[in-house]
Structures are given as C-alpha cells and as structure tokens.
Amino acid sequence: MSSVPTGSTFYVASTIAATKTTTIVTNASEASVTSAAHGYSAGDYVLVTSGWGRLNKRAFRIKTVATDTFVLEGADTSNTTFFPAGQGVGTVAKVSTWTQITTVMNPNTSGGDPKTVTYKFVESDVEYSINDGFSATDYTLELDADSIGGAGYTALKTLTDVQTDTIMRMVTRSGSILLVPCTVALNESVRMTDGQINRVVAQFSGNNRAVRYAS
C-alpha cells in the first residue's frame, strides 16, 4: 500500500556502546557474527566495521542471538568474490540510546546513485559505460529553529561537535525502517523566509550504503 511522508519519524543514535571485537563473520545469506559474550538481544541495532569493504561502517538490526553469536538481518555476505572467506572480522557496537528528532520539515535525500565510468575505444564511434560502485546516501532535515534546547536538537548538536559515526533511523507511516550510517552536521544559522517559520538544517552524511527493513 502506498504511503505519504506524513507520520514518519526520525531518530538518531545519540549513544553507542563500546565496541566489541568480532572473531568470525560467516559467508551466508544473513551473516552470523561471533563475538564472545556479546550480551546483545534480537532487535538491537549495531554499527559494524569489517575487513569487507561492502560491510564496513554499515548499520544492521540483529535478527537472532546465541551466547557468543548473532545474525545481522539482511547482511548478505554469500558472494565470496565480494566477501572473501575469513577476512570480514572487525568490530561491532550497539546503539544504547535513540533520541527522536522532532519538528522535522522537508526531509530530503541525495546520493545512492551508481558512479558511472564512461569510455570509448579508438576504433569505435560510440561510448560505453560501466558502474563503479555507488555514491554515499545523504539526508537533510529542516527543523523548527525554536526547537533549540530539545532532546533531539541537543543530540544533533553534540554529534556535530564530536563528529563520531552514528546512525539515523527513519520509520515511515507504513512501518518500514531505514538505517543510514552517517556523521551529523547541524547548521544552527537560522534560515528566515517570509511566510515560513524559521528553520535550521541538519545534514546526515552517509557512510557506505543504507539498509531498509519492511517493518
């Protein structure tokens, strides 16, 4: 069923727990990760670093857990060309606190598009093109400037100051979830336009690719 932006909510990972070392990351349709006595639960959100570039600095939800292992929902690492066996270890860190970003207006996204390389052989009169990866996905949110001092505004300001990796989570009216691993930049210079409320802009600069869940 189609949905509209109205009713969507935005959150930022304002606190991320200490990293834990991963010792095994399997090649599977949904990667299983070994991290001794990790203490995570199904439904937790984590930020992953990995020797695999296609997994590095991405955000996932934990699907299932055992004492020393957990499964990253939607993390398909089955292709050993892209994910060479035994080379995917790194770290993982759990989101401890989500803070809602309120008074959001005009959410906008950019990036995520293929980066195209165009070339032409001398003996040919036409060009060819191939895809060379994807650009990072960025998000921009306008906020009511008078929300200064609120929990969401304060969290964005703090993350802007420290410039640590975090996650932006969007939940649409239909219940789908988007995770954007990113850094945050809150521009507190107030935008004034006659006939509109005063606004500030938060930029979420994406790291690697976003992940989307149906619910």
Image: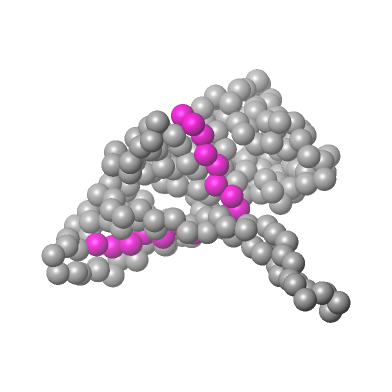
Instruction: Examine the structure image and report whether residue 201 is included in the region drawn in magenta.
Output: yes
Residue at the spot 19% in from the left edge and 57% down from the top edge: 146
On the rendered structure, is 99 left or right of 88?
left
* Place of residue 32 in the rendered image (x, y in percent of width and height, measured from the top left): 70, 29
- Place residue 76 in its image quadrant: top right
**Residue 134 in view, yes or no:** yes
Q: Nearer the viewer, residue 186 or 128?
A: 128
Q: Which residue occupies the extreme front position in the image?
A: 125
Please state the extent of the stretch shown in magenta in the rendering: 199-215
The residue lying toward the viewer, choosing from 35 and 129, is 129
x 65%, y 27%: residue: 70
Is 211 magenta? The answer is yes
Residue most extreme to the bottom: 122
Residue placed farthest to the right in the image?
123
Q: Quadrant of the N terminus?
A: top left
Q: Is residue 181 left or right of residue 143?
A: right
Percent position of residue 169, x then y:
44, 43
Q: In the image, what residue occupies the spot 62% across and 22% down?
A: 65
Q: Position of residue 108 (x, y in %)?
A: 39, 56
Question: In this rendering, would 103 be left or right of 1?
Answer: left
Residue 151 visible in the current orientation:
no
Q: Nearer the viewer, residue 106 or 44?
A: 106
Report the number of discs.
Answer: 0
